[in-house]
Image (tube, rainbow, N blue to C red):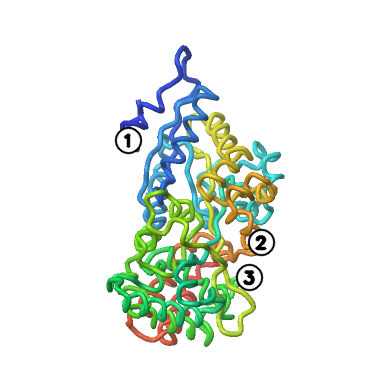
Amino acid sequence: MRHLTQTSALALLLAAPFAGGALAADLSIVAGSTGNDLQVLREELDQYQEKSGNKVDIVSMPSSTTDQFAQYRLWLSAQNQDIDVYWTDVIWAPQLAEHFVDLSGPLAEEMKQNIPQIVQSQTVDGKLVAAPMYTDAPALYYRKDLLDKHGKKVPETWTELEQTAKEVMDAERAGGASDQFWGFVFQGAAYEGLTCDALEWIKSNGGGQIISPDGEITVNNEKAAQILDKAKGWVGTIAPPGVLAYQEEESRGVWQTGNAVFMRNWPYAYSLSQAEDSAVKGKFDATTLPRGEGGESGAATLGGWNLAVSNYSQDQDAAIDLVKFLISPEIQKKRAIENSKLPTIASIYDDPDVKENAPLIAKWKDVVLNAVPRPSAPTKGDYNEVSKEFWSAVHETLSGTGSAEKNLAVLEKKLKRLRGRGW
């Protein structure tokens, strides 16, 4: 009997086998816990159990992707047989490829429906390491009611956002809002989420992608330093000082209680912000992220989650069957409408039901097709260390420990040492 953590007593009840039949397989899937992800997954697994007769348990993880990756690597290095399916971040394929089953054969037909660059992001040396479950590209959430109230337009540049956030915040506080009402919240903690936010700032300002696709270190440049110094100026003025410890859920908490004009976050926050108990229900909208001065467009980091089958699973065929179910067009469509998850299948964006019931999804197709990847491919197995060095340099800048120019120069030296390993 496997000794695995359950999400709740209710999950145990829901996961019980249907009456009258023996279990074909007893599977486990490990997944993170941002927003209502685990609740949604449990509902999908209940459908799968009824359809297949297989039992599936969830092993829940913390919301921090950095913590998740560390635990995954421990389990996989130990060749843990208790986990059959891993829910993986888009950046992890090159680092964990050796531990997962090649899905390119079993899922060949399914992959033909998917957006090619998303499939490519999970392919390492011809091996499909993980199957795309849903993709991600962040949005700028804004309080439409407050912009209308104060006669402001939706900002198109970071400078416009800074100015509008300050003016609306000051006016609302003068009108009776508390000093806990802020202009802008984002992900400022020292973790992978800050790599995403800062990549967007730098790329949108013409400062490149940290490391180019061919492995050249490009982050130490004037335009990158310029936008990071600008972001430093947001902390304590339009953004709360505590933003330096915010991940996605902390940002959403401030926003969803009605205490921010703008928020940078992923699409999952859209449906949650429209919940009945949300203070911003019916008062907001979302648009593309701002650009830097002179930039042609904003930049949205390519995110997304995938499903990988462990080499050490004792039920690989059943695990692959579970993956097929969770990446199917029917489940992706349902996930898009009910939970604002961006499909990896292009045709779903144009589905009439999706257009009617999830307008954010429909208008995000072009954003997804043009999303900016993090440099996991060129840095291969060293990506996590590269990202940690980058987010640390950015966090020091935002915290006031050194200028962006100084911190990026130090970062470049550290990245050159890492590159000496062979990427």
Nearest the viewer among 44 and 255 is: 255
Labels 1 and 3: the sequence-earlier one: 1
In screen coordinates, is 4 left or right of 147?
left
Q: Which dot, 1 or 3, sits closer to the camera? A: 1
As helix, strand or loop, the secondary structure at mark 1 comes to loop
Q: Which residue position holds label 2?
A: 366
Disc 2 marks a residue whose amino acid type is Asp
Q: Secondary structure at mark 2?
A: helix
Q: Please state the horizontal and vertical placement of residue 405, each as a whole percent of the image.
A: 44, 87
Residue depth check, mark 3 versus mark 2: number of the one nearer the observer: 2
Which mark, by number, is residue 8? 1
Residue at 54% x, 24% y is 52
Label 3 SS: loop
Disc 3 from disc 2: Cα separation: 25 Å
* Separation (CA) of disc 1 from disc 3: 46 Å
The residue that mark 3 highlights is: 214
Which is nearer the eye, 283 or 96?
283
Image quadrant occupied by the C terminus: bottom right
